[in-house]
Amino acid sequence: MEGSQSQSQSKGKLYIIGIGPGSVEQLTVKARDVIMTSDYIVGNGTYLDQMASLLDKQEIVRSAMGKEVDRSRKAVELAQDKVVSMISGGDANVYGMAGLVLEVAEHAGLDVEVEVLPGVTAITAAASVVGAPIVNDMCTVSLSDLLTPWEVIEKRLDAAASADFVMSLYNPKSRQRKSNFSKAIEIIRKYKEDSVPVALVKNALRDADQDYVVTTLGEVMDYNDWVDMSTTILITTNDSRIWDSPYGKRIITPRGYHRKYDY
């Protein structure tokens, strides 16, 4: 009953849509349909450009990096009586726009129906490029200390590495943050062996821009200058291994079937 009452009070609706790696082909069918039928599309200019082929009759609200709060306020405001799609790279719940938009709506006390549509996020996109590196327990840690203090990030890195999780490092480097990646690797090497397979995947599933390296934890810093903000780092476990397949190097993190079955 509460959900029905909320819908009747507002004619509009706000979708928060994860657009995945950035190509229309990687969208879910529902995300594609909602984008094409929305009254307004709100987003960062880069993500709007990636969805350009779906944008025709919709009104476009474009903003730059660093304007996330303003963008969220505008989306919530428009959704009072219009169907609005806020687009977010990857998945909106993985370092994306879902949390901020809901916070803005909550703090404003506005009655807006919100639906979050999932997208392919960097950890799964990168994993698909190099085989099966994240099949067992995994975690993601962003190395950006813009919104999270570095002391907190260090604690999370230490805890995840000590438990031998597969670790995906997001936002490893930027022009202002050049040392966080090397500091993270130093922490992780306290717990994981140098032979642990590591994948560095740049622009995962972005057609011609995609590139990747399969290496080990002991040698990953050889590629320090190659790593940037578009690179997702997959650091696997002490049980993981590299398979030199006929089609290139692949990483396998065992799920545990070998302990129970013969194959």
Image: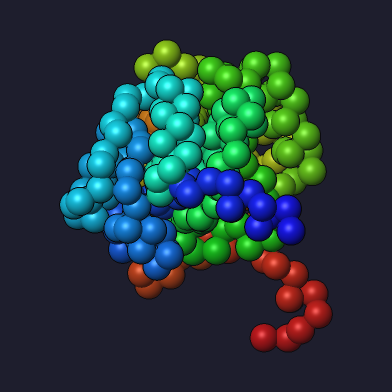
Using the rendered view, name the quadrant where residue 48 is placed: top left
- The way the protein has been coloured in the rendering is rainbow
Q: Is residue 194 left or right of residue 131?
A: right
Q: Residue at the location (64% across, 29% down)?
A: 109
Using the rendered view, name the quadrant where residue 191 is placed: top right
252 lies above or below 91:
below
Image quadrant occupied by the N terminus: bottom right
Q: Is residue 85 left or right of residue 240?
A: left
Residue 194 image point, x, y percent: 62, 41
Q: Residue at the location (63% across, 21% down)?
A: 148
Q: Residue at the location (66% across, 57% down)?
A: 4
Residue 34 image point, x, y percent: 38, 58
- One can see residue 16 in this view: no
**Which of 148/169 is in front?**
148
Q: How many marks?
A: 0
Q: Is residue 137 left or right of residue 170?
A: right
Residue furthest top in the image: 176
Residue 143 image point, x, y percent: 56, 27
Residue 120 image point, x, y percent: 47, 55
**Which of 240/211 is in front?**
211
**Which of 42/165 is in front?**
42
- One can see residue 157 in this view: yes
Using the rendered view, name the quadrant where residue 246 is placed: bottom left
Image quadrant occupied by the C terminus: bottom right
Q: Residue at the location (33% across, 43% down)?
A: 41
45 lies above or below 207:
above
